[in-house]
Image: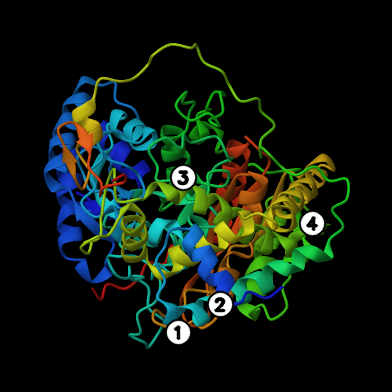
Amino acid sequence: MSIDIETAARVAKLARIKVEPEALPALADEFNAILGFIEQLGELDVENVEPMTSVTPMRLPRRADVVTDGDQQAKVLANAPDAREGFFAVPKVVE
Amino acid sequence: MMTDLNTLTITQARDALRKGETTSVALTEACLAAIEGADALGAFVHKTPEIALERAKAADARIAKGDAPAMCGIPVGIKDLFCTEGVASQAGSKILEGFKPEYESTVSAQLRDAGAVMLGKLNMDEFAMGSSNETSVYGNAVNPWRAEGSTAPLTPGGSSGGSAAAVAADLCLAATGTDTGGSIRQPAAFTGTVGLKPTYGRCSRWGIVAFASSLDQAGPMTKTVRDAAIMGTAMMGHDARDSTSADMAVPDFEAMLTGDIKGKVIGIPREYRMEGMPAAIERLWQDGAEMLKDAGAEIRDISLPHTKYALPAYYVVAPAEASSNLARYDGVRFGYRADLAQGDGITEMYEKTRAEGFGPEVKRRIMVGTYVLSAGFYDAYYNRARKVRALIKRDFEEAFAAGVDSILTPATPSAAFELGQTHTDPVEMYLNDVFTVTVNLAGLPGIAVPTGQNSRGLPVGLQLIGRPWEEGDLLNTAYALERAAGFVAKPEKWW
């Protein structure tokens, strides 16, 4: 399995990370080095092995269905790069 | 009365505080002075002297009343990965520039509530992704140790490099670290300090910036095993805000340090004998086994057959989880947002913010994670890695079921290496974690203990791996090893 420039560009797009076209070949090379390393996993027979979902055998705990938090708009917005009138502000999404 | 107060262990400082021989303010001032003189180490990246002195005064008042817990008044450093209320918490990344959490992580809150004094935040690899502390936005942390006859700056390891450097250089009595694939134990081994990664679920992950949630675990980085026991007890405990936090009582680990390991079975896994392993590491490992044998333990050769698949499995699972966890850095809610051009929409905002805000290693791992989770590859990579992870865990379970109490391995494949080496192949750096990463995949407790120095005078350490939830027994074995090894060397001050 080898990653070409087109695939590298697609992955960057999916990850929402801007990569300049001239940086794509080097990125594809790095992916290939890492994926080449990962390929070793193919040597193992994993038939009938359950994929691990939790490293410690525990049930996800449940809690009472009640409100435990809230009413802290100012704190929620305190670290926003752009907050106005009680909202996060972003570039226009709909015309 | 005493030597420089910043050079004390937690144990010595606690005892001196309780006897009234010193004060937390005096301890804190000694550490703050040491920190001021140690900028060359790049360890403390956000200093909080006002908070420290305020907490030290409060601790002294509490100690005077006579009911203070062990960590009360002890000056510590906090890894930048922990969210600390009102204090910059950047995970070593530009993308969290300016972020000052409105809340405190559970672990740092527990330390704070126990009376520990926060001196500041410690350098680390960006988002804990790295093994040399070279991916940090703050620049490198530098190892206080130098090879004999050399002034070349060495790495303190990573990702908890600032924590390790600060403890080794006596800038604080102890520090918090986090460990996803070896990020506590490898830097501890590189700096002649002790680093404990508890069983997954022991320390709450709440408020710790997430890297790979199924692997991340916080732990203490200290000067001695006893200190790790004391600080570990204070850091662990159930927290309803972390759904994977273990609802189990945390014993007083210090009380379990008897040094008696007679009859304990110590496994020596043959798969950890790597090709090309330096002779010094091989000898150190053998010596360590001899020491435990002399202390009355039974040494047994064991096999952990899937060991060689641990690193490749890790480099699927960890990037996959990271790609999901780091999706939250979008330039909207906190931290950095890129300057936008006329007409840029929200997608350009995301893409530019993340391109400018993340460093190269973080971007690489996010994208690898995105790839292995993408349609068509999920089964081939991610599900296969999760199955291999189950096999790695089963190896350990079988060893423990056969009567092994703990497992002795080298902590790292080498001593600390020079900063600034160029790595053309990212996989080369990943090999640093070859002995530690299995422990995260299996959720087990592990501890690095310094046991010697190589031919160039650099510290080298061994790792002990324990049964799940049996940190007390693990610490006791580590304590026996520490006593037998008698490692007392300190780096010569050059900074």
For label 1, the SS is loop
Which x, y percent locates residue B342?
A: 20, 62
Q: Are marks 1 and 2 on the same chain?
A: no
Which residue does the image show at 48% across and 78% down from the upper left?
A24
Q: Disc 2 residue type?
A: Ile
Q: Which residue is mark 2?
A: A5
The alpha-carbon separation of the residues under discs 1 and 3 comes to: 30 Å
Which x, y percent locates residue B8?
A: 30, 50
Q: Which residue is mark 3?
A: B219
Upstream in the sequence, badge 4 or badge 1? 4
Q: Residues within 10 Å of mark 2 (few under 14, many from 20)?
A: some
Q: Which mark is residue B422?
A: 1
Which residue does the image show at 17% across and 37% down from the upper left?
B56
Quarter occupied by the N terminus of chain A: bottom right
Q: Which residue is mark 4?
A: B304
Q: Are marks 2 and 3 in contact (CB under 8 Å)?
A: no
The alpha-carbon separation of the residues under discs 4 and 1 comes to: 33 Å
- The chain that hosts pointer 4 is B
The alpha-carbon separation of the residues under discs 1 and 2 comes to: 24 Å
